[in-house]
Amino acid sequence: MATAVQPLNGVYTVDTTHSTFGFAVKYMGVTTFKGTLDDVDATLTVDGGTARLDGTAQIESISIRTPEQFRQHVLAEDFFDAATYPTVTYRSEDVALADDGTATVTGELTIKGVTKTVTATGSWSPEAELFGTRKAALQLEATIDRTEYGINWNADLPTGGKALANDVKLTIELGLIAPSAPAEA
């Protein structure tokens, strides 16, 4: 006998220990460069048949496995311009959490002061309890064109082509603390 999925309901807050905003971009046409923004804040508000997702990630929390000099370049004007635009934000217009566990979220993504509509797809997990805390989860992916957000840096490769692709895959992993759940230890 199959168990029915229990729908989410209420205001879920982010579990910062288990949440990230990741990105991946093809580098030199060969490998994939990946990074994460680890300082994220989000709420998922579900009220009956409607849901809303709002989130923010701090650019300064970027985690990339390269020398500090490269990290500083990514934080500078050529890429994120963290001094002027310290956050990436997302405000949903439509959140669909289907009974089969799939999720589709459409909303406004703002990077470097530029806002564009982005639809992300993925999955959601119903509440479960571990160590006295009830949690749910939301995993989403979307692809954006970084140049639409003013992230235009590139370099010509000696063999032709560019160092960085324009398409960037975004991955959002949100651990969500259920309403009325005790504070995390």
Image: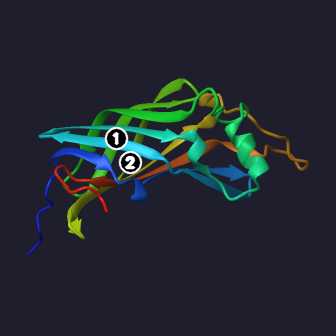
Residue at the image position 26 percent from the left and 55 percent from the top: 183
Q: Residue furthest right?
A: 158
Q: Nearer the viewer, residue 20 or 30?
A: 20
- Relative height, residue 43 to residue 65 (above, below): above
Instruction: Tell me the residue at 29%/34% (across/down).
Output: 94
Please provide percent x and percent y for residue 176: 30, 53
Residue at far bottom of view: 1
Name the element at disc 2: strand
68 left or right of 146 in image? right
Q: How is the model colour-coded?
A: rainbow
Residue 121: give its label: 2
Q: Residues within 10 Å of mark 2 (few under 14, many from 20)?
A: some
Q: How many marks?
A: 2
Left or right? Give the position of 132 relative to 23: left
Tell me where residue 23 appears, x and y as whole percent: 56, 49
In the orientation shown, which residue stands out farthest toward the left? 1
Q: Whole-percent x and y of residue 39?
A: 49, 47
Whether pointer 2 and pointer 1 mark residues with C-beta atoms closer than 8 Å, the reply is yes
Is any atom of residue 181 visible in this view? yes
* Quarter where residue 45 is shown: top left
Q: Position of residue 25 (x, y in %)?
A: 64, 49
